[in-house]
Amino acid sequence: MTALNDLADQYVDELALLDPCLAAAMGIAGQETRLTDFGPQAVRERAASARRMLKAVEDTPVAGDAERVAAAVLRERLATQVALADTDAYGTLLDTLDGPVQRVRQAVGLLDQGRDTAWEVLLARLSAVPEALAGLRESLEAARRGGRVAPYRQVIRNARECRDMRQYLAGLPAGHGDGVLRGALEQAVTAANHALARMAAYLSRELAAHAPERDAVGEERYRLGVREFLGTRLDLRQTYAWGWEELGRVQREMAVTAARIAPGEPVPAVLAALDEDPRHQMTDRAQFRDWLQELADAAITDLDGTHFAIPEPLRRIDCRIGPADGPAFYLAPSEDLSRPGTVWWTRPEPGAPIRTWTVPGTMFHEGVPGHHLQLGVTTLNTSVLNRFQRLSCELHPGHVEGWGLYAERLMDELGYLADPAHRLGMLATGQLLRAARVVLDIGLHLQLPIPAGTGFHEGERWTPQLGRAFLTEHCGLGPPGFVEFEIDRYLGRPGQALAYKLGEKVWLEAREAARRRDGAAFDLKRFHHHALNLGPMGLDLLRAELTRADRPAEQVWTGRIRAERTAR
């Protein structure tokens, strides 16, 4: 242990104690019976903790390359947290993707493991729901009295999610069967649902009356969001223009790929035909889940030892159908590996066919070589990364989501999307949507004009109504409510939607820079191993580390390869 690593461990413990919901998402063990206090005093305590830790990091000497990187990662995240607190960026708290309501739902859901559920632990966390929501209401009221209320769109969306959570909780006790504990679970669910009903009523009937209609946060606040989610600084107007260029590039690729399926047909017609094609449909949920598992297992078998070195604990992914609507997502293994890496897939509509032509690209994003490999390697890397680095993937969306999108592109390069339907699915749901997000996220929050030559309301400034029309026209895939959710997501979490495409851009550019630097000696497996061993970090730091001329971390990689060969 070193002074810096001691400090990182201390911060993880303090963070988990002050924010159990975030700890649950990060896989930090030890706070499973608790939920986060969202009251005003607790919010101030979390900000004070970040300030103390930032000063401590700045006062702590570092030695060696690994500590240099670790200190830079910790310093950048803490400084960003302090900047967010100083500007009261989340004073209104509500969010469409990762606010208090969503985190309470996730924290409870993570303990729901079917037959393997630790019911006493789940009971304790369920019992904490009313107090967590009471603290949230207290903070929202304090902000309202100070003249700050989240936009109407966010208030109403959160009221709806409170009602949706009630439906989910109502079914939990049935999983335990009979017995004394089931009665306690039913009582806890009843109390939690009463609290959720009160919160939904407060949001929709009281707070909504004070909520502004304006969604755009403006350039200053948006730049802070970019810093938070990407760990970088951008020329926003240049990035907006690049988003349009990238959108056009992907559309041209889609046209070429669609022509391989149905020559002469327009792309929308080909997409619609794929949706109706029985060769790309399943109706049985269990069969679909098994197919997801087969895709995950096959990717691991093929890639291990060729383009990646996959540690034994990561050679299995738990594929599940999600308990609720929402996008597919990956949850990393907990630090003690008691919780496996899990892909949660969107719950199919009852009776509706499950369309499979878009699935492989997404599975490569969420599984291997995407998030499962990336986050799993990080969790296991105890010899190089300190505890904060290993568990902070949730805090670096640009790094994480950029790698996920890079993984889709990589698998296309390696020939795993040879079926033109699967390649078109990757382009439509991965590349096209993420490029559109760059355009919309910046355009909506800065209310920029739509450029000439785009063929879409040229010269007009972005509004949510135009955003919906744009997504429907360009990316109208997905279940009912998809477009509405996307628009609410961008407007409720400024900057986050850039993480995918801008992160992928950094990964691709860094790989190309390494290829030019190393020439004939460039090795893709070595690049991947070195890159993943750096751990999660902001994009500016990632670019700098991956393009360094000396690359001392290569010594670590070489030593590990030798150790693996010796073990075999």
Image (spheres, rainbow, N blue to C red):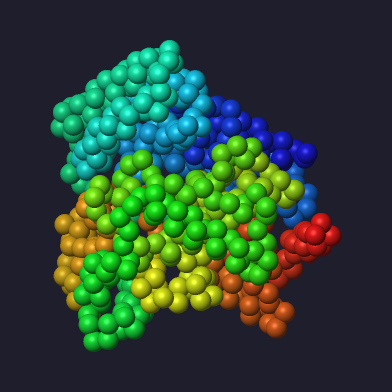
Q: Looking at the image, can residue 234 be seen?
A: no
What is the x, y in percent for residue 540? 55, 60
Q: Looking at the image, can residue 327 be seen?
A: yes
Q: Residue at x 35, y 18 (%)?
A: 186
The C terminus, quarter of image:
bottom right
Image quadrant assignment for residue 552: bottom right
Q: Is residue 60 left or right of residue 458?
A: right
**Camera-side residue of 87 and 267:** 267
Q: Is residue 323 above or below residue 547?
A: above
What is the x, y in percent for residue 145? 26, 26
Residue farthest to the bottom, as pictured: 264
Q: Residue at x 42, y 61 (%)?
A: 362
Image quadrant assignment for residue 533: bottom right
What is the x, y in percent for residue 245? 35, 76
Q: Is residue 296 above or below residue 86?
A: below
Q: Is residue 549 left or right of residue 328?
A: right
Q: Is residue 116 above or below residue 270?
A: above
Q: Residue at x 37, y 24 (%)?
A: 173
Number of numbered tags placed on the structure image: 0
Q: Residue at x 68, y 74 (%)?
A: 523
Q: Is residue 52 left or right of residue 203?
A: right
